[in-house]
Image: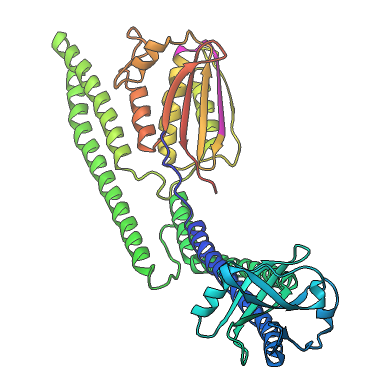
Amino acid sequence: MARRRAAPSLVRRLVLLAAVWSTGVLAASAILLGLLFEQAALRRFDWGLADLTDSLAASALPDPAGGVRVRDPGDLRTRRVYSGRYWQVSRTGPEGRVDVLARSRSLWDTELALPADLAGTLDARPSGTLSFEAPGPEGQKLRVRATRLVLPGDAAPVIILAAEDRRPVDAEVRRFFAATAAVFVLLALGLIAAVVVQVRLGLRPLFALSQEIADLRSGRADQLGGAYPSELTPLADQLNALVRHNRESLERQRAHVGNLAHALKTPLAVLSAAAGSERGDLADLVTQQAGVMQTQVDHHLRRARAAARLPGAGAVTPVAEVLDDLTRTLMRLHREAGIRMDWDAPDDLVFLGERQDLLEICGNLLENACKWGRGRITVRGAASGPDRLVLEIDDNGPGLDPERRREALARGGRLDESAPGSGLGLSIVSDLVRAYGGVLDLAASPMGGLRVRLDLPRSAD
């Protein structure tokens, strides 16, 4: 039987959506915080460089020889060679040439690398200041602050530069990023765990409703009786109303079936009795046809009764009990033929349906096995899934080829036209199995005869 493809879990979907949203928001927040921290660190860094350029600008005086005199700002790091903190005073000459007028001892015999258009950029800025990145004397990554200054009595402006290795700031930013990422990962895990708990608690009434419906189908309950939130109460009420309606419809159908059986059997019994008291071809014909009519009535009444049932609506039947009763009865009936029946089924194997229907199904199949077998019949029952069971009936008879197996499953098909009977047994079984959403299959038996395999609903209780 074709099974519906499993739908995605509602819990998984809600948790996944919340996890994706929370993770995205937290990741964006962590990146934003890191960028803000980096900007703040660079601003503090630039303030330190601005103090150095301001100190140099305050002490700068033009030199009569065309240079600039600058008082050492007293920063010990600017006196240590390649310490990572530097200053330089330059002037842009003709054709863009840069002349270094003064520099810190820490630069030793090197100069700060300046952008080619630095002078023009500073002239275009109202503040006359600019911060940029440049390589240091030993490949350091320097943060440079440049200030344009016109000294008194000096026509050409000078550029005062202060620079410092920014790698410690970058390392501090990386540490902040790492710490922030760790905190936000823990926060994300906590939020996801909270979402899981929230979803599970929020959907608990749905899980309870699902369990109650399962109990209803398996026969452990006859209606939904749980206390549900206001959103689910109308659904539970409608389901209870549907169950009551189906139960009432079932009872009406059974009553109609019983009334029809009583109405038809009495006239047929009268015809059979009247024909039996007479002699002649007409009496024999009436008796024969009345028997055929009785068989057809029984067949169609069984089909109507099966169609009227609601499979799994509360009825459950232990398989072992039915097999034990049937095998005992049939072995007594076929004692002279030496029929031997062996059956095996777990005590907890339970058919999700009515006992009478399982008796009808197994009884017809075992009767056929007794008729066509050669004295040996085995029956095996087992669970084949969480809500399915399988019954296999094997005999050591002549069996059937594949083409005749298909014919035997047809409505009214017969295993052998020469044998007595109406040929309705397998058709009745097939109708009942279909009514329960099961599958009837014929195959070759390892015993040499025919194997009948039934797939039926099972109660998991």
Give the residue drawn at x 56%, y 67%: 95
Horizontally, is 367 left or right of 64 in the view?
left
Is the residue 386 above or below the residue 140 in the image?
above
Question: Which region shows up in magenta?
Answer: 372-382
Extreme residue in the front direction: 65
Give the residue drawn at x 39%, y 15%: 405
> Residue 197, can we see it?
no
The x, y position of residue 27, in whole percent, is 57, 66
- Residue 153 sits in quarter: bottom right
Nearer the observer, 112 or 29: 112
Q: Is residue 381 magenta?
A: yes
The x, y position of residue 443, in whole percent, is 47, 17
Nearer the observer, 93 or 149: 93
Extreme residue in the left direction: 282
User: Magenta residues: mostly which secondary structure?
Assistant: strand
> Residue 185, can we see it?
yes
Is the residue 430 above or below the residue 404 in the image?
below
